[in-house]
Structures are given as C-alpha cells and as structure tokens.
Image (cartoon, rainbow, N blue to C red):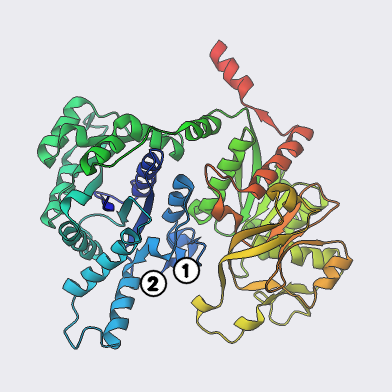
Amino acid sequence: MSTKYIFVTGGVTSSLGKGIICASLGRLLVAQGLKVTIQKLDPYINVDPGTMNPYEHGEVYVTDDGAETDLDLGHYERFLDINTSQANNVTTGRIYYDVISKERQGAYLGKTVQVIPHITDEIQSHVLELGNSGEYDVVIVEIGGTVGDIESLPYIEAVRQLKYNVGRQNTLSIHLTLVPYLAAAGELKTKPTQHSVKTLSESGLSPDIIVCRSEHTLDESIRSKVARFCNVDLEDVIASLDAKSIYEVPLLMKEEGLDKRVIERLKLPTKEYNLDNWIGFVEAVCEPSGEIEIALVGKYVEHHDSYKSIVEAFIHAGAVNDCKVKIRWVQSDDLTKANVATKLKDVAGVLVAPGFGGRGIDGKLSAVEYARTNEIPFFGICLGMQCAVIEYARNVCGWEDANSLEFDEDCEYPIINIMQDQKDIENMGGTMRLGKYACKLDKDSNAYTAYGEEVVFERHRHRYEVNNNLRYKLVESGLKLVGMNPERDLVEIVEIPEHPWFVGVQFHPELKSTVNNPQPLFVDFVKASLKYAKGNKLYHSLKSDQKKVAKS
C-alpha cells in the first residue's frame, strides 16, 4: 500500500486546536492497526523555536534526536505513543536555510532560485521524507497558521502540487474552521467557515472534510448549510465541540465518524478498534476519587503553555494514582523567605520548574528550602534540580557563596558550572546538551523504585551541569548522587535519603510521558504527594461530593 497523506489546515482564527484534531485522528487510526506519524509545518522564519522566549512560543519540545520543536509534537507523542524527530517539525526558516545552503553549494546549476519551484519543492521533499521512509501507512501533516496568511501560501501551494505528485487517491485535505455563536442573534453563523473555505479554494486546495469547531451543537440545518456552500458531502461535516479534557477528543471524533470517513476515502485497511486503555484513562481523568494540590514554582507561570508537558505529565500520573492533580501556579519572582510559607501553604508537593537565566532564582531557592526543611515531597527539573543543589550547598554544606556560573560568574563556589567542552562555543544553539542520554541509577533510590530498571534514557535541554570538581562536598554532607551519565560521568539525579521524597533531575522527564506510558518519576512523585496529603489532611475526596450531588 502506498503511503497516504492527510493535510490539515485551519481557518478564521488560530488556536482552534489543529494539533489536537491531528493527534486525535492519529490515535483512532493507530487504534485500528495503522502505522501513523504526524508532521508540523510552521510558517515562522526561525529555524526552530529553540531561541524563542517561552512567552512568545510556549514550551520548546525536545525529541530523542535533540531537535528543538513545536509543542504540538508533544501532543503527537502523548496521543500516538510514538517518538518524533527533527523530520516531524519543519519551519519556513529551515526550508529557506536548506534552499540557500544548496544554492551556495551550486546545487541549482546557476538557475534563479525562486519561491516556486524551489521553496515549494523543498517543502514537498520534507513531507515525502517521512512518507518514503517505508515506516508509515499514514502521514498526517498539520499546516500551522490560518488560511489566507501570507506566510502560509508556499505551504498551501506545495500541498496542492503534492496531491498530484503522489496521486490524489493517496491524499486527503481536512479543514478546521470556526462556527461561532452570536448571542445577540441567538444563532450559529456559518459565514466565517464559508469564507475560509473560499480562501482555501482560491489557492487551489479544496477540503474533502470540514471539521467545525463550535461551542454549541451543530444541528442538521447547520451541517447541511456548510456542506452545500462548501462543496462537501453532509457526512464530511464534522462537529468538534468543547470537551472536559483534550483526551476525550478522540472519542468525540469517533462518535462523529471522522476516522470512518478518512478510512473510506483513502481505502485504508484496518482492524477492529482497540481503545480500551484509552477509554479507561479518560474515565480515570474525568472521574478521579480525590484531588491534591501541588505547587509548580516557575518563572513563566502566567503562560501555562510554557510548562505544557509538565501539566500533561501530572494528568497522566494523577490517573494512575486515581486523583486529580490541581496545580497551584507560583511565580518565583514573587516568592521570598518571608512569604514562602504563605504561598506554599497546604500544598501536597512542590515542583520547581525548568528555565533559563537568573530572574526568579531566589524565589526558587526559597521554595526548595521550604520543601526540604518541612519534608514536603519535592521534584526539581533541570534548573529546578540545579536550584536544589545550590540551596543544599549553601544551607547544608555551609558554602554561603555557592551558585551557578549562569547567575554569578564571580562566585567562590560554582557548584553549577558550564560544560567544559562548551565554553568556547559562541552560537547559542550549539551550547546545549540536547536529546536522549543514558542515566545509570543507584538501586537504593527513589528513582530506581520508580523506574524499576538500572539504566534509563531521558531527554535533556540545558547548558550547565553539577560541577564535578565540587560535588564531593555535596556527598560528604549527605546529598546522594543516585543517577549518573555513564559516558561523561555527569550528575543526572540527586536525592536526600532522609527526606520522604526529594528528587532533582537534570533532564526533562515530562517530555516522555504518554497516556499509555506515564512517566515513572511523575507517577511516584504524585504517589508520595498523595500520601503526604492524606497524612496531613490535605486530601480532598471527590467521590463523596459526587454522592452528595446525586442525593440532592
């Protein structure tokens, strides 16, 4: 069978949820025995989002091969249980970079290099790279931005050409659009959808299926109107309504028949559904027995997408532990030794989040000290782990001037130091340890209890490490180095043995948490926090509330 390509575009407005629709469709196809991957085409000119401010772009999602990518790839991996790579995220910057590099090398034999055909050909080659690998039955391609944007035009044209190059029978176009409800008129309006489809058609690409994003149910007359004026069959008008959880969306799309129409149109060979695990997970997420509150201390908490994978990892871990994890968002800039007890009062656990730069570090250190001295379950990730080491060096080892060279280049005890082999590199993109690295675990540790295996592989994104020349003092004072990178003898995990649950990790465990494989450290952290909550009367039962509602 030839690889099939599904192109997903969006219209009217951004943030309609193309990534979730792509991931949900992918989940339904995988559940029927198909091999599926998803690719994101981003129209911005940055080569990748690696140097973008978190407020600008949200989380940077890192793959096993060290690619810094769009956060939608996290949804793809969480929904499909696949590993994505550099090939799954393509930006305009990457396309132009590749074309210009080829031009400089003489690859175009002196011809004038133009948007058409050279840029559009390069886009097609990136799409076909996944399809021609022989690994997938279906490649779903999400085109970022909205139809009509100038920056999206080369992608639309490339897709138009590609449909003919690979055979129209091997391609399908899905258009996600908005059907708003106007309260003043008391009705849903299809005109924005009609204009969006018209704009797409003017670019030479007509949708085969239209997914209508709406807050209200689409009745037969609305669906019929969309079908009639947008040139699709009635059964190809799919409603996408608000859901309590994004993980419900695949089940809602199954009810709407989205995957059924895709399978019929592309003539895909399928097996019986196997969605039992997914349904069980959704039930656990939507109907937990209780709730606990965990503080997430970070520098970018006003923009929750900056910590998207952490939020999702908490959902996965909560489902395993039959509880909802309510996140208390704590801005580290506002946290001090004077107010930390008030800001973190009655939380069941403290997670100090990753980040870059010196802003808000004092607040993070205060959070670490509070969790350590009050024996509250603590989880430090990347910069959060480094803050845990700095706090320990200052307050337990007695090195009051201990710090990271990232924050203080003249400190007496640089307990966190830049990697030696990175010191002479000036290009920001080249100074980080990125992607998958091995970590060997001490069997007498919380980490080993969580993972259940001696060597694990986790993803990294950082420049600085625990200073190997000074780490002896940490060990002498009681901090345990329970995870080490065997190739370079770098500290990966630290723990305090006397503490109920105090774990700091240099890597980003949240990036590998999926619905079917929740991240073990998050599962164990939530378990420890749940135990602490119950022991300190911080656990809130939801089942009793549900019974009260039922009786009333």
Q: Which mark is residue 50?
A: 1
The residue beneath circle 2 is 47
Answer left or right for 334 relative to 443. Answer: left
Identify the image quadrant of residue 26. Answer: top left
Q: Nearer the viewer, residue 346 or 266?
A: 266
Question: Type of residue at label 2?
Answer: Val
| Callout 2 secondary element | loop
Mark 2 in CB contact with mark 1 (< 8 angstroms): yes
Looking at the picture, how far across and down is residue 162, in whole percent? 20, 60
Above or below residue 63? Residue 536 is above
Q: CA distance from mark 2 to mark 1?
A: 8 Å
Above or below residue 186? Residue 57 is below
Q: Residue at x 75, y 67 (%)?
A: 390
Looking at the picture, how far across and down is residue 421, in whole percent? 63, 83
Answer left or right for 180 relative to 372. Answer: left
Q: Residue at x 85, y 71 (%)?
A: 473
Question: Type of residue at label 1?
Answer: Gly
Q: How many marks?
A: 2
Above or below residue 474? Residue 446 is above
Q: Is residue 353 visible?
A: yes
Answer left or right for 121 relative to 344. Answer: left
